[in-house]
Amino acid sequence: MRRFDLHSLRFHDASETWRTLPVEVAPFTYGGLEYRVPEDLAETRLTAARVGDNLTLTLDVDTFVRGSCQRCLADADVAVQARGVEYVRHGDSGATGEDEDEEAYVVAHQIDLERWARDLIAEALPVKILCRDECRGLCPVCGADLNADPEHRHEEA
């Protein structure tokens, strides 16, 4: 799923409703390396709360990001939990978030779930994606994996 139509939400007598939605998340580049979520799908939970004709939308994402360690280039998996909130006022074609200059995730009652989920995942990533906290990286002289050979040294000339 890439987009979700807000008109499909049925509140009945409640002021809040939710949906669990698999959202397509295309591979993305971070720190010069490519990362992806498993099977390019992230499980999300979209909660919509209404007050009158206005909506508060909350998207929760719980997934893993897979790619290369930024120190040694081995495989790395990072657990990601993220949450975002958007507001939709009655009569607005878009949402109002923290930064009015950015394009809204909601336009004409359609939520761009793919972009919203990808942005939330990217914001939740650590500064460096590592295979493990104690990763030693690669030798700057010859490129040897310092995790495989912690005693690796070069003689000074």
Image: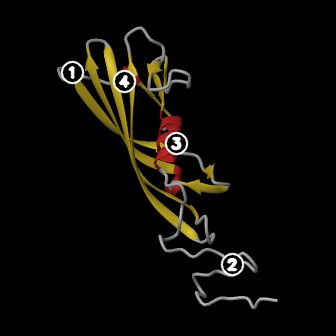
Question: Which element type, helix, strand or loop, lies under badge 1?
Answer: loop
**Label at residue 118:** 3
Q: Which of marks 1 and 2 is in front?
A: 2
Tell me, what colour scheme is on the image?
secondary structure
**Label at residue 139:** 2
Disc 3 from disc 1: Cα separation: 31 Å
In the rendered view, would you say 144 is above or below 67?
Answer: below
Question: Which element type, helix, strand or loop, lies under badge 4?
Answer: helix
Of the image marks 4 and 3, the number of the one nearer the N terminus:
4
Disc 1 from disc 2: Cα separation: 62 Å
Disc 4 from disc 3: Cα separation: 23 Å
Q: Nearer the viewer, mark 3 or mark 1?
A: 3
Q: Nearer the viewer, mark 3 or mark 2?
A: 2
Q: What residue type is labelled 4?
A: Ser
Q: What residue type is labelled 1?
A: His
Q: Residue sitting at 59 percent across and 55 percent down?
A: 35
The reply to whether callout 2 and callout 4 are in contact (CB within 8 Å) is no
The reply to whether callout 4 and callout 3 are in contact (CB within 8 Å) is no
**Label at residue 8:** 4
Disc 4 from disc 1: Cα separation: 12 Å
**Label at residue 39:** none
The reply to whether callout 4 and callout 1 are in contact (CB within 8 Å) is no
| Mark 1 surroundings: few (<14), some (14-19) or many (≥20) residues within 10 A | few
In the rendered view, would you say 36 is above or below 20?
Answer: below
Q: Quadrant of the C terminus?
A: bottom right
Q: Nearer the viewer, mark 4 or mark 3?
A: 3
Frontmost residue, 105 versus 109? 105
Which residue has dot 1 on it?
Answer: 12
Left or right relative to 88: residue 113: right
